[in-house]
Amino acid sequence: MSYNPQFEKIGTILVKEGLIDKKQLDEGLREQQQQPNIRLGELLVGLSHIDEDALMKGLGLQNGYDVVTENDLISIDPDLLKKVPESFAKAHLLIPYRRRGKIIQVAMHDPEDILATDSLHRLFGGKVEILMIAATTVRAAIERHYQSIRRSGEVDQVLSGLDIISAGEEEGEGVDMRLSQKDMEDAPIVKLVNMIITEAIQTRSTDIHIESLEDRLSVRYRIDGVLQEIMTPPKSSQMGIVSRVKILAKLNIAERRLPQDGRFTVKLPGREIDVRTSIMPTVKGEKVVLRLLDKSSFTLNLTSLGFEEEMLAIFRNWIRRPYGIIIVSGPTGSGKSTTLYASLNEVKSTEDNIITVEDPVEYQLDRINQVQINSDIDLTFSRVLRSVLRQDPDKLLIGEIRDHETADIAIKFSLTGHLVFTTLHANDAPSTITRMLDIGVPHFLVASSLNLVMAQRLVRTICVNCKESYSPRADVWSQLLLDPKKYTGNRLQRGKGCVQCRNTGYYGRTGIFEILEVNEPVRRLIYNKATQDDIRDKALENGMVSLRKSGIRKMLSGATSPREVMKTTIEE
């Protein structure tokens, strides 16, 4: 006899579909005898024999409905959502899903809810297709997507209560706001700025970009190193948002022609976030960038940064030397400061006096004396460093080598028995040495003082919640300059996209590293004014792993994707 799920009981369907076995069904039926008012499916979920999505699959087969999962609801048509009141959606556990031609698809937990289906047919003109969804999934989707609608409504409400007047040219430069600073504390614009910052913290953002377009503003968050647009308030809100940020950072509200930098702190229960503020005048108005530094999420150990075991052993060996220079290079946002902080945390002891000179101090470390640069009072790197030697230091961290004077002082420190940690902006490890020479440091001093140069980058890691294995096309190996014949058959990992990773397929970041040990062969090349290519060839000959190769290793291990490796590193 053929199997037709629409004429079978749910227990039989679940067994036939391989979702539970006969033993689990019998246990569920025995439990139902004790609790006759509870449906068998709910009892099986309670016994952990099946999850809600699997139960929905069985019920969908029984009732002839397609089933919607959590990942299907990542993107929902906001116009459809606005037509269904949130209270109605919560009361009947339903959510409008998407348009299919002239048909509106709606996900419902109970398709037999006649009152709800009749209301939907009237609302959408009868062209409605019902899909099934688990109760927990639809509740989470309602909360998530209607929150977005509420947020948009709050923005509109904020803007309707905003009254800002631009001073005319004849009245002088600046902005004349009807709301005083004290009154601003209760003004609607405060809610909008608070909303932007709070949402950024919740989404693990490192930066907030508020920039002016032709007819609107764009608010973007940098999540895992990539900017994502979150909201687009109208152009009229620009002056209010910028002014509020300036007040928080204690900047000059009236100055709109010059760049301004400031900072403020957001305190949450158990967390403290430093917000570094940069405001830059552009032809379309002032652009605001807020950099969020969450002290509570800072990792203070080297093992969690993404080092391979062999690389970590090499790095630890050099940072425990008594003197010399350790340079970490890379672009802005590549994790250089985090690596140096973790290094100091590993080597610090009560026997050493460790001093850092930074601009700014990003994280405060125990048992380490940290000095923050302040150019406004002429507290510069060179001025502080000239005084540090009188503080009897053992180890020194210089936030960044920016000029010849700073580099010269760092080298003199290292040559007089001190271990110096610092950063430099360079493309890779060999070019870091070239950059030191370009700054004006003599080649013999570079050769004498350098211990190790490490270039690093951050690559996004594949989301573990939606990770899947796949066989890449042959041209993927070719693009990475790998032999397709050698790697054919290798399976890689990718993220399908889910709610947890905001449909990107990535969640979090890890480091890839290029470590150049300045041993005798390399030191001799620097002494002899060898080219950057000669230094690179010698380092590779001595076992240096390039950034591209380090990224490929991460890719083959399933941590990241080919796209991330190619985006972050260059061909060798």
Image: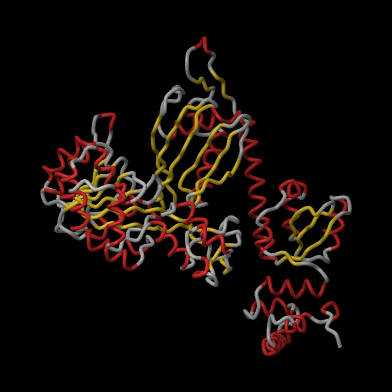
Q: Identify the coloring.
A: secondary structure
- Residue at the outermost top position: 170
Q: Give residue 539's position: percent from left, percent from top.
A: 28, 58
Q: Residue at x 31, y 47 (%)?
A: 431
Question: Considering the image in quadrants, where does the C terminus appear?
Answer: bottom left
- Residue 152 versus residue 134 in the image, above or below: above
Left or right position of 545 against 396: right
Q: Residue at x 67, y 72 (%)?
A: 52
Q: Give residue 238's position: percent from left, percent from top.
A: 56, 30
Please count the marks in the image.
0
Left or right position of 394 against 200: left
Left or right position of 71 against 183: right
Q: Give residue 110's position: percent from left, percent from top.
A: 78, 66
Left or right position of 71 against 255: right
Q: Give residue 517's position: percent from left, percent from top.
A: 25, 58
Question: Considering the image in quadrants, where does the N terminus appear?
Answer: bottom right
Residue closest to the eye, 164 or 17:
17
Q: Residue at x 50, y 11 (%)?
A: 171
Residue closest to the eye, 528 or 39:
528
Q: Residue at x 23, y 46 (%)?
A: 356
Residue closest to the eye, 548 or 483:
483
- Residue 440 versus residue 314 in the image, above or below: above
